[in-house]
Amino acid sequence: MASGKTLTISLMDPPYESETTTTVLRIIDAALRRGHNVNVFAYEGAVALPLKTQAAHPNPVKGTTAEEQHHPTTSGFISALFEAARAGGAKLDWVNCGLCVDERGATDWIEGVRRGGPADFVKMAQESTNTLVIGTR
Amino acid sequence: MARYLSVVERAYHGTLEEQDDTILWVNHMFKNAGADVSLLLRSNAVNYAVKGQDASGLTFGKAALDVPPTIDHDVEELIKAGASIYAVEEDLADRGIDKSELIAGVKVVGRREVAKLFDQHDQIWHW
């Protein structure tokens, strides 16, 4: 059941390079499970997290195929979060910073992600119960 | 043949998404390509040598990470492949890790011995 509360998160880390992204996705998952709405402002490298063109690959060290390895993609995780939001009656709004997208050519996203900018983050923060800024370390 | 020492200190960065540690992985690939490479685990990376790690259970909505990373197993496989794995003794102690918790075959070296270890290799790759 929707709680009526909204959490905004600003995230900067790219996929596959830090545990920060996994932790943020876990926070989003936990918030959605509690019925909270979640806004995400993906800034800099984080705009690559929902790229639709991400693909599973095999692991030549282990000798496993992509299917056996069931290699995850962050875009797959984010798709599951959108589904969880819809199922639970909460809202997930994911904004990719447009200029960050342009400079990276990272334009092909999964369904649900929209283009925006810093002004969207300000609006999100103003309308949220609280805001969590997670910068790159 | 030239001897290489890879120094690994940045630990658990992207290991869940990658299902392994990228530096251990690429060094295993170097080994498979014929390189005589050893690894020195220091700082937080000494925890990679602790046996019995379990990273299972991660889910996002209905999406589950079915194949979690098994870093300790990956270190064991590197040893089996012929790579020497060193861990800095003081970094283990700082984190409360007893030598009995380490997987078999990991060589514990004191900080004072690290320079000597460097001298035993032709190139040092600090990741």
Image: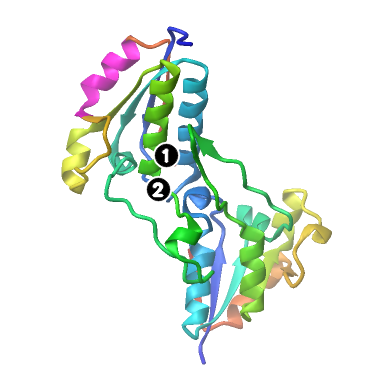
Q: Residue at x 25, y 40 (%)?
A: A109
Residue tagged by mark 2? Answer: A73
Q: Position of residue B57 (x, y in %)?
A: 61, 41
Q: Position of residue B51 (x, y in %)?
A: 73, 58
Q: Are marks 1 and 2 on the same chain?
A: yes
- Label at residue A110: none
Q: Chain of mark 2?
A: A
Tell me which secondary structure the magenta stretch mostly adopts.
Answer: helix
Highlighted magenta segment, given as a residue range: A115-126
Give the image location of residue A15, x and y in percent. 38, 46
Is residue A78 visible in the rendered image? The answer is: yes
Q: Is residue A46 above or below residue A90?
A: below
Judge whether residue B114 can be spotted in this image: no
Question: Could you tell me if the residues under marks 1 and 2 are in contact, i.e. CB atoms within 8 Å?
Answer: yes
Which chain contains the residue that carries disc 1? Answer: A
Crowd band around label 2 with a 10 angstrom C-alpha radius: few (<14), some (14–19), many (20+):
many
Residue A77 numbered mark, or none: 1
Q: Is residue B113 above or below residue B35?
A: above
